[in-house]
Amino acid sequence: MLRASSLALALLACACHTDDVGIPCQLESQDQTDVVSIGLSAFDCRSRLCLRYGGAEEVRPLCTASCGQDNDCPSGTDACPDGFRCIYAKAKGATGCCRLCVCRRFIVEGQALEDYCQANPNPHCP
């Protein structure tokens, strides 16, 4: 009996936290020329991941989380009413070729990043 409850607690601790995906967050630095910026230590996000996806000035950084499929991401939030997709956000860096929840209205479709990341998976995604 004790083992079952310990296992349940361990599974809960490992579960993805998507309840704050889409909440505005603060990036350490915001280079407006970067199309994708990811902060790895955003204390206002449970996942510690803050994502600014898109080069337009009006794009605000939002909390994100790692995901495996679109259903792992919220269907919509106040900051992103169109919902989120689970996509590869960028190719290089600590979160390169990691799938993250990205606001649908900021996504620019392209197959090149998808192809690159499928050929070069990142085994250390958060």
Image (cartoon, helix red, strand yellow):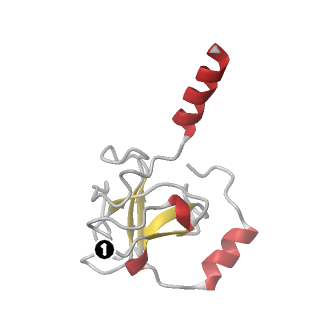
Residue at 72 percent across and 66 percent down: it is: 120
Q: Position of residue 22 (x, y in %)?
A: 34, 61
Instruction: Give the position of the N terminus as an image quadrant.
Output: top right
Residue at 32 percent across and 69 percent down: it is: 31
* Element on which disc 1 rests: loop
Residue at image mark 1: 32
**Vertical arrangement, residue 3 with respect to residue 113, above or below:** above
Q: Which residue, as the protein is rendered here, is positioned at the far front?
A: 1
Q: From the viewer's perspective, is 61 left or right of 72?
A: left
Q: Position of residue 28 (x, y in %)?
A: 31, 54
Q: Which is nearer the eye, 7 or 90? A: 7
**Vertical arrangement, residue 86 with respect to residue 35, above or below:** above
Q: Give the class, few, some or many, for how many residues have Cα within 10 Å of label 1's Cα (few <14, many ≥20).
A: some
Q: From the viewer's perspective, is 93 left or right of 28?
A: right
* Residue type beneath disc 1: Gln
Q: Which is nearer the eye, 40 or 12? A: 12
Q: Position of residue 50 (x, y in %)?
A: 38, 56
Task: Report the number of discs.
Answer: 1
Q: Position of residue 41 (x, y in %)?
A: 39, 46
**Vertical arrangement, residue 7 with respect to residue 120, above or below:** above
Residue at 30 percent across and 81 percent down: it is: 56
Residue at 59 percent across and 64 percent down: it is: 69
Specify the quadrant of the image occupied by residue 29.
bottom left
Q: From the viewer's perspective, is 40 left or right of 97?
A: left
Q: Which is nearer the eye, 95 or 47? A: 47
Specify the quadrant of the image occupied by residue 39.
bottom left
**Vertical arrangement, residue 47 with respect to residue 6, above or below:** below
Q: Which residue, as the protein is rendered here, is positioned at the far right?
A: 119
Q: Which is nearer the eye, 10 or 29? A: 10
